[in-house]
Amino acid sequence: MNHLDRLEEQSIFILREAFHKIERLAMLWSAGKDSQTILWLVRKAFFGRVPFPAVFMETGFDMPELIALRDRLAKEWNLNLIVARNNVEGMNPSKGRVVCCSALLKENLKKIVARHNFGGLIVGVRRDEDPTRAKERYFSPRDAHMEWHVEDQPPELWDQFNTDLAGSVHLRVHPLLHWTESDIWEYAEREQIPMAQLYFARHGKRHRSLGCVPCTSAIESDADTPAKIRAELRATKKSERSVRAQDQESEDAFEKLRRDGYM
Amino acid sequence: MHSTEQLRIVIAGHVDHGKSTFIGRLFHDTGSLPEGKFEQIQAACERRGVPFEWAFLTDGLQAERDQNVTIDTGHIWFRTPRRRCVLIDAPGHKEFLKNMVTGAAGAEAALLLIDAVEGVREQTRQHEQLLQLLGIKQVVVLVNKMDRCGFRVDVFRRLAAGYPGKLVIPICAKTGDNIAAKSANMPWYDGPTALEALDGFESPEPPANLPLRLPVQDIYRFDNRRIVAGRIESGALRVGDRILFSPRHKLGTVQSLEGRQSVGITLAEQIFVERGQIISHEHDAPLVADVFSAKLFWLGKQKLDIGRRLKLKLVTQEIECHIESLSNITDDGAFADVAIRTKRPIAFDTHDRVAATGRFVLVDQHRVCGGGIITKGESIERSQNVFWTETEVSRADRERRNKHKGTVVWLTGLSASGKSTIASALERELFALGMHTYVLDGDNIRHGLSANLGFRPDDRTENIRRVGEVAKLFCDAGIIVVVAFISPYRDDRRLARSLVDEGDFVEVHVNASLAACERRDKKGLYRKARAGEIANFTGVSAPYEPPEHAEIVLDTERHTPAECVEQILRHLQDNGRI
Ligand SMILES: Nc1nc2c(ncn2[C@@H]2O[C@H](COP(=O)(O)OP(=O)(O)OP(=O)(O)O)[C@@H](O)[C@H]2O)c(=O)[nH]1
Ligand SMILES: [Mg+2]
């Protein structure tokens, strides 16, 4: 079996386990490259269907192209779309990038989980993104305050996942944990997954990772196809999240966000 | 495409022997560190007032950096000249063995690090044993911190002697000796560097010619199809194949097949399928038994002991079990040979035959507390299989609670239409599936509770009222109660239905024509009724009012009792009763 097939099979297995085991399951869907890949895998796992809601978190600083892609696919793929927005008066990155992220994303997420009483959330994080995600489980329990107890994670082996909720309020499910950025592009190319044009170079610039407009910067690049993006990734020494300004505020900025319930 | 193939390699060894440092240094010496990472680590060390630590590359959590210990397994991608690898940085501290197992279980090869000065320690041994149990055969030993023993060849040789037949490399992770480049400090060593050793590992080929194993993961009914979903763990499946479901021991035929390995199939037959069953070909089935021998690793906080009730998870099967016997426990209490008994028979293989169906985890209070590989098991002979031929369901069995809804399955139909046969077959299946069930029929009601009643309309009504009340109590007790009474009057059945909540009542019309029933007439009742020896006989001298809105109609002239039972089971499943 080919490398991409193996990644795909593993993700499908995880998605089906989540769907079987978790009541009130939903997926976070940003219409970014990882989200798009998950949605693609979900449709494979469930024979063309997306049998749970797709939650899109709006901050008010959203990339217009992603909103457009969202609305188009929500129709085409018959999604149960939930748009979540946390309006915090006057909040913007000048108040502190981490403060802003907490208010507009993290708190928003807490609210939406509480409102719908979600038992599980599918999230597109990958282990290669940063050192805290490198230590994630496929099924990761979060407590009543959405906190991640990273010092005492349950064991997970042989595809036997922790799906019993003992004391924790919801589960994070990470079907892309074992994928790399390069895998995503290789797969996107093979499967012809619809992706935002922002990822492909125009006038010598492209986006590598998409977040809010003020905190996401484009990189210098001529890569205008998935194949060229992969070639670029092989050569680069820059990490993917180096374009996300909120991570760079302090050594533990991202860990703090994540412990507290951020994706 | 080959360049994207990847090998997963776990870095094992005792706490502080330098596993994380090795990874950091390997990245540095091969120019693989991301831009700015070196400076970030430097700043993190300065902030803590400690000398530079390569380990901070993978020890990314604040707690790990503050205590200079790896807490949880980290995965990091690395490119050697030959291939891509995932390096799995495992913690060495004994308290974090569960995290070490989590990382190691997914690995295909291992590097075992040993501190040259400290030598082999408790977790060195433990990790070695674990690698062996997990079936990781490719292991290279790295003797680290050679700087601390003055790069002495005798120290190295003494340690290397403990690993005959294995590649053992002297390294100094801190300074990069024999990591990516040959060490000038150890001219006496002329073997490969650690980096070359990584490239020496082989990508294990999945064994060919294994029997088909497809554990059922779920049943999807998104449209009018009924898709059985699961992942093929070994072997191959084709449309038209005759397949066997174990341990339920039902046969089916693959009608359609979607997907490569994670597949969805539909069946030609109307059989009941549930999660946990393992699909195989008929001639090459997994073992089915309620006891097996295994090599176990134990992560539990309490000591491993006989008799403790645990949950066993083996592919998609989940079942209560206990440890029946225990031997060869290691001093640290982490490994043992065991016999495990499950509450009901399950399907499995020995690990050396099919790995995926030959291993299991144990769960205590929602948490994985151990796991193991099956070394021996013997299938129960089908003919003497008490489980499948059980006719009587003991009261003690019934009293243990189970996870399904209390339901009244009300079978109505003419005498000899097949109610009792179907009722007892249904009871047997439900019981085999681990459910609480009980049959109410003429035998246990008419002779006792309704002994004072005859067969006149008033008596029949009163009889059905009593049966309905009893069924309601059973239903309240969470039991699937199967009622098998002619119950000829619509109003009486409506009354019985009204006693329980909507959905709890499943009316089943066991349908066969009067002529067919009369032909069957095993007990000779029709003959007697025709001869006038029995009065008020339904269909002959008393009316039968067939249901107008029965949840299920069974055609017993065209279908066997087994097929009828499948139809009922499927209805119960579709409606969330079981
Ligand atoms: N002198 C010397 N010190 C080393 C060497 N390798 C690692 N160390 C030191 O040993 C200590 C422990 O190293 P780590 O890499 O954290 O050990 P580890 O095996 O990852 O430990 P755990 O993950 O907690 O089990 C650190 O202070 C390192 O600097 C070496 O080759 N020589
Ligand atoms: Mg370490």
Image (spheres, rainbow, N blue to C red):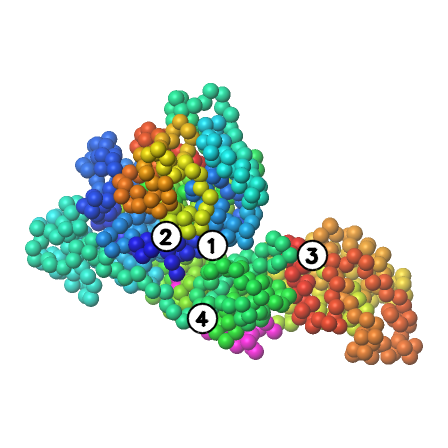
The stretch drawn in magenta includes residue B3: no
Label 2 sits on residue: B102
The type of residue carrying mark 3 is Thr
Callout 1 and callout 2 share a chain: no
The type of residue carrying mark 1 is Phe
Label 4 sits on residue: B211
Cα distance, mark 4 to mark 3?
Answer: 39 Å
Cα distance, mark 1 to mark 3?
Answer: 32 Å
Which mark, by number, is residue B407?
3
Cα distance, mark 4 to mark 2?
Answer: 28 Å
**Sequence-first disc among 2 and 3:** 2
The type of residue carrying mark 4 is Pro
Q: Position of residue B272 (x, y in %)?
A: 62, 64
Whether residue A98 appears in this view of the structure is no
- Which residue is depicted at the point 13% across and 57% down? B156
Cα distance, mark 2 to mark 3?
Answer: 41 Å
Cα distance, mark 4 to mark 1?
Answer: 20 Å
